[in-house]
Each structure stands twice: as structure tokens, then as C-alpha cells.
Image (cartoon, grey):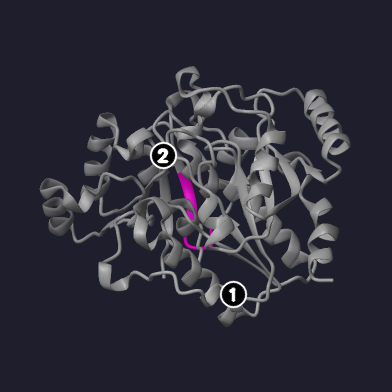
Amino acid sequence: MNNKAIVLTNGLFHINDAKTAHGLVRGTERFTIAAVVDSPENAGRDAGELLDGKHRSIPVFGSLESAIQSVPDARYLIIGIATVGGVLPPDMRGMVRSAIKNGLSVVNGLHEYLSDNEEMTALAAAHGVELVDVRKPRNRADLHFWTGEIWKVTAPVVAVMGTDCALGKRTTARLIRECCQTAGINTQMIYTGQTGWLQGGKYGFIFDSTLNDFVSGELEHAIVTCWKETQADFILLEGQASLRNPSGPCGSEFLISGNAKSVVLVHAPAREYYDNDAHWGRIPDVGTEISLIECFGSKVIALALNTEGCTPEEAVRYRDAYEARFNIPVLLPLEEGVEKILPVLKSLKA
């Protein structure tokens, strides 16, 4: 089955708003990413090299038309951005229409649903393509309420949480899963955002599109189902936002309803404010976040550092200082991998 896709960022690839595209470039089992449409300045470059210096044979094009010409058998256009409020930027609307007219189904992870737009729906019907709104809520009949069945799960549940949004929680969880599987450890991951689904996640739900009454139940259902069907040794939970981000505090559900007694905490030591926005408030010291998590009865077993704004030397200094201060492994996931966490995970099963 053809699952070849073009990812649309339209000049935003270099910022955190394109984290959906970043995740897809780093890896997905659901689609084959054939191209990224960004700015003319980035045209001709490799998306992997542009992202983190690793060549991944995904060319960047400066226009949708040139991408379609280069990948004539593409089946999907994926909107590769996550904007504040989940709104489709006006300058992308025409590109989405053009994609539909060229026979591409559109996969949309924003809160603004294309299938609710009469013009887009009519256009898609006329050209025989799909509009896939990943974040569209499930029907009430398909939602689960929390039952307590989580107490039967014997595999350690590890939440990958963060001190802010857009830090790399999903990427860190995915890297840990891959590292464990390479080491022969059956480790599964529960996705909780649209990109996790886009990357091919089998178990999970879209946290911020789920009615609040059913968040805990959907989380429990995903964990229990995954454990029963895979006999996992470990289950990783993809965290969302942070416990104290005022724009969307989140995380207690993973610790309480998901019974995650262990946490890998992702932190950007050079980031001063939530979402890099001063009026949202200053990010507290990471030590206070660790203490807060402990108040929920869980333990931070490792830190993972997002080194945005750091030189390589600064990243190493932060790593060494945090390891000395907290006496836990401190990971540089993109620079050094996550292998240092394996002994700690294995000790959870001892």
C-alpha cells in the first residue's frame, strides 16, 4: 500500500512549531516521508541535516509544486506544524487546496478540522481524496472511564515528562524504546499526541482532544491493552506539556491514573521562560520539579537535556553538574544517545 507522504512546514521548519515535522523526519512507521516543503532558502537541502545534522535522504523543496513534481507517486500531504491554538495558518490554506487538486489526501494534526470546512470537504470529494483530522475527538461511545485495572499491570510504567512544552519528550521516549529493543528488552510506548500516531504508534490516544472525564480512562485503557497484547517488560508514556506550564498544566494523570512510579524528566537548561515567552512566567529550578514529582509518589530516575541555546561545551557542563547534584543519569539524547538509562531500567525489574 502506498503511504508516501510530503510534509508541509512552509518556512517554519527551523522553529518548535514544526515539531510534528521534526518527529516525522526522525522516523515513522506509518508513512514514508518523501519530501518536506519549507522555504526557498532551504530548498535543495536534506531535511535530516537541516534538523540535527544527520542525513536522512529527505529532500526539502521551496514549493509544493516542485515537491509534487519530484514525488509524483506521493499519496499524502501531512501538515507538519503545531501552532498555538491549533489553527491552520492562512498562507497554508491555498497550499492545502492545491494538494487536494493534485490528488493528495491531507493528514492534519491541528485542532482546526479540515473535515468541518465545507469548501475543503467538497473539494476532497470532487478529487476522490481523504481529509484525515488526527485530533478529531472520538465518539463518546468509544471512550473509556478509569476502572482501576491499571493495578494489575506488573510491568514498570515510566513516564517521560518535561519542565515545559516542545522539549523532546516524545523523541526521548522513542529513543529509549529503540535503545531497549536493540538490547533485547521488550519496551512499548504509549503515544498521547498527534505526532505519536503519525509516527505509527499502535497504543495511545490524543490527550488534548479527549474529554477531561475520560483522559484517565483512555490512558489506563492504552496501558492495560498494550501490556496484555505485548507482554511488555516496560511501558513508556509520552508526556505532554508540564506540571506547571500555565498555558496547559499536565502530567499528574500519568503519575496517578497511569501509575507511573518512575519518570524520565526532560529539561532545557538554557530555556528561561515557559514556551520562551516571558509573560507566561519563568521556568522554576529543575530540582523543584523533581521534588514536585516525588510528592506524587514517583521517582525521577534520569534527566534528559534539550540543549537548545547551548554550545557543546555548555551541554557537557550542564550534564556533569546535574549528575553530581542529583546522582542520577543525565542524558544528552540527540548528542550521545540514551544507553546510560539501561542499567537503571533493568534495576526496576530486579
Residue 94's image quarter? top left
Instruction: Report the residue at 50% width, 28% height from top.
Output: 275
Tell me which numbered mark, 1 or 2, is placed earlier along the sequence. 2
Q: Is residue 68 visible?
A: yes
Distance Cα–Cα, label 1 vs label 2: 37 Å
Instruction: Identify the residue under disc 2.
Output: 81
Instruction: Report the residue at 75% width, 70% height from top.
Output: 185
Q: Residue furthest top?
A: 278
Which mark lies nearer to you, 1 or 2? 1
Q: Position of residue 304 (x, y in %)?
A: 72, 42
Q: Position of residue 241 (x, y in %)?
A: 51, 42
Please determine whether, in this image, residue 182 is positioned above or below residue 275. Answer: below
Q: Position of residue 171 (x, y in %)?
A: 61, 48
As helix, strand or loop, the secondary structure at mark 1 comes to helix
**In magenta segment, residue 181:** no
Residue 345's image quarter? bottom right
The three-letter code of the residue at mark 2 reads Ile
Q: Which mark is residue 189?
A: none
Instruction: Identify the residue under disc 1.
Output: 151
Please determine whether, in this image, residue 95 is positioned above or below residue 318. Answer: below
Q: Position of residue 13 (x, y in %)?
A: 48, 33
Q: Quadrant of the N terminus?
A: bottom left
Residue 34 horizontal side relative to residue 73, left or right: right
**Region rendered in magenta:** 28-35
The three-letter code of the residue at mark 1 reads Trp
As helix, strand or loop, the secondary structure at mark 2 comes to loop
Residue 154 horizontal side relative to residue 324, left or right: left
Residue 9 horizontal side relative to residue 164, left or right: left
**In magenta segment, residue 29:** yes
